[in-house]
Image (tube, helix red, strand yellow):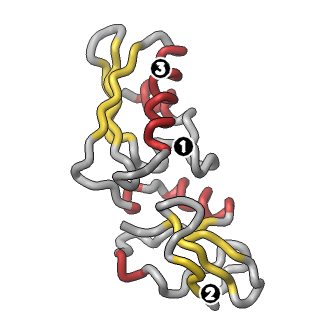
């Protein structure tokens, strides 16, 4: 399993290339079915996430490059949660300019001030509930005036 996860960690998220699909928490399980076939179970961040098709293709491709056929299974339950983001992914998001949600945050945190990933100010406002992708909302820092994305909690 560790070898499979190490290989899957080479696949960046198509919408946020600074984190990989394992750090993102969408890879639920990876196991060998026999010596030539592996199974990778994934859960999308959102049920309508357009990146899932690309991720499935990337998994199939990288496993083939490593000598295995891959069976990719999408499971919708339990639903993905931002609590599955690794601490490393949260820090990479912040450095990239995306404010990650706090662990245990819920939908009620949307619209409230978020910490600016550039200057650290909490003097921010939501510009739009919808950001550059379905999983993000748009905010602006009222101190440094920079716009930034907030990775929505759920």
Dot 1: few (<14), some (14–19), or many (≥20) neighbours within 10 Å? Answer: some
Q: Which residue is drawn at 50% across and 76% down?
A: 129
Where is residue 84 shown, x and y percent of the image? 38, 55
Cα–Cα gap, marks 2 and 1: 28 Å
Q: Residue at x 33, y 8 (%)?
A: 35
Q: Which residue is drawn at 54% across and 54% down?
A: 88
> Residue 124 shows which numbered tag?
2
Cα–Cα gap, marks 3 and 2: 43 Å
Where is residue 53 shown, x and y percent of the image? 45, 37
Q: How many labels does the image show?
A: 3
> Residue 20 shows which numbered tag?
1
- What residue occupies the far right of the structure in this picture? 144
Which SS class for mark 1? loop
- Figure quadrant of the C terminus: bottom left
> Residue 5 shows which numbered tag?
none
Residue 95 drawn above or below residue 5: below
Q: Which of marks 1 and 3 is nearer the N terminus?
A: 1
Which SS class for mark 2? strand
Quarter of image, res 43: top left
Between 17 and 56, which is closer to the camera in this rendering? 56
Between 86 and 67, which is closer to the camera in this rendering? 67
Residue 31 drawn above or below residue 67: below
Q: Residue at x 55, y 35 (%)?
A: 11
Where is residue 141 shown, x and y percent of the image? 68, 84
Residue wearing tag 3: 63
Say whether marks 2 and 1 touch (CB < 8 Å).
no
Q: Which of marks 2 and 1 is nearer the N terminus?
A: 1
Between 47 and 109, which is closer to the camera in this rendering? 47
């Amino acid at each position: 399993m560790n070898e499979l996860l190490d290989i899957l960690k080479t696949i960046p998220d198509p919408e946020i290339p600074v984190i990989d699909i394992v750090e993102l928490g969408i890879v639920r399980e990876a196991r060998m079915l026999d010596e030539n076939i592996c199974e990778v179970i994934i859960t999308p961040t959102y049920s309508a996430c357009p990146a899932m098709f690309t991720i499935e293709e990337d998994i199939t491709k990288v496993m083939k490059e490593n000598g295995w056929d891959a069976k990719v299974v999408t499971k919708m339950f339990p639903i993905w949660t931002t609590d599955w983001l690794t601490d490393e992914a949260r820090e990479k998001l912040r450095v990239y300019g995306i404010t990650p949600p706090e662990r245990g945050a819920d939908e009620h945190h949307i619209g409230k001030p978020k910490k600016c990933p550039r200057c650290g100010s909490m003097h921010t406002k939501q510009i739009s509930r919808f950001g550059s992708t379905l999983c993000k909302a748009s905010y602006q820092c009222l101190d440094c005036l920079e716009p930034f994305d907030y990775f929505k909690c759920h």
